[in-house]
Amino acid sequence: MGTIGFGPRDEDTVAVSGRTLDLLIDRALPSIADPAEAEELRMCGDVDGISFDLFEPGARERVAIAFREGTLQLKRELEAGTEPLPNFGPGNIGKLDEILALLDRFIPADGTPG
């Protein structure tokens, strides 16, 4: 089990499977230009959790934007009928929507921290 956290409250956190977290990180990494930030995101996968509020503010914004892009990419794949892993299909779209809603709440589409 993995977690994606955006703040200190329970409602600021989404629980996901470890493989969902890995799929999201894999899709976010290509959008991260800074090798240190990419490594920090990789390490989040190793410990089964991301806490965006622990990232330095500038890195938080960049990594969250990349994570949003990765989440949108995975959602598009599932909507198109692609199954990136066995038994990982469209039933996961609701969880991706939950993640996107939190991303939009904490890092609005214009990129400014909420």
Image (cartoon, grey):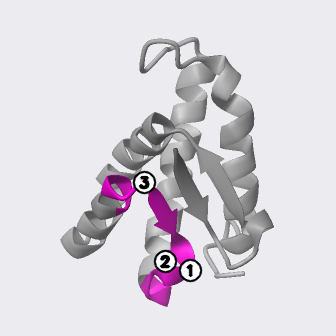
Question: Which residues make up the magenta segment?
Answer: 44-58
Q: Quadrant of the C terminus?
A: bottom right
Give x and y (percent) for residue 53: 56, 80
Q: Earlier in the sequence, mark 1 or mark 3?
A: 3
Give x and y (percent) for residue 55: 45, 81
Give x and y (percent) for residue 17: 53, 38
Q: Which residue is mark 1?
A: 53
Q: Secondary structure at mark 2?
A: helix
Q: Which residue is mark 2?
A: 60
Q: Is 53 inside the magenta-drawn segment?
A: yes
The alpha-carbon separation of the residues under discs 3 and 2 comes to: 18 Å
The alpha-carbon separation of the residues under discs 1 and 3 comes to: 16 Å
- Mark 2 is on which residue type? Arg
Residue at the image position 48 percent from the left and 46 percent from the top? 70
Q: Is residue 85 above or below residue 107?
A: above
Count every numbered label the image shows and give the total. Answer: 3
47 or 92: nearer the eye?
A: 47
Of the numbered discs in the image, which one, if any, rests on residue 48?
A: 3
Q: Residues within 10 Å of mark 2 (few under 14, many from 20)?
A: some
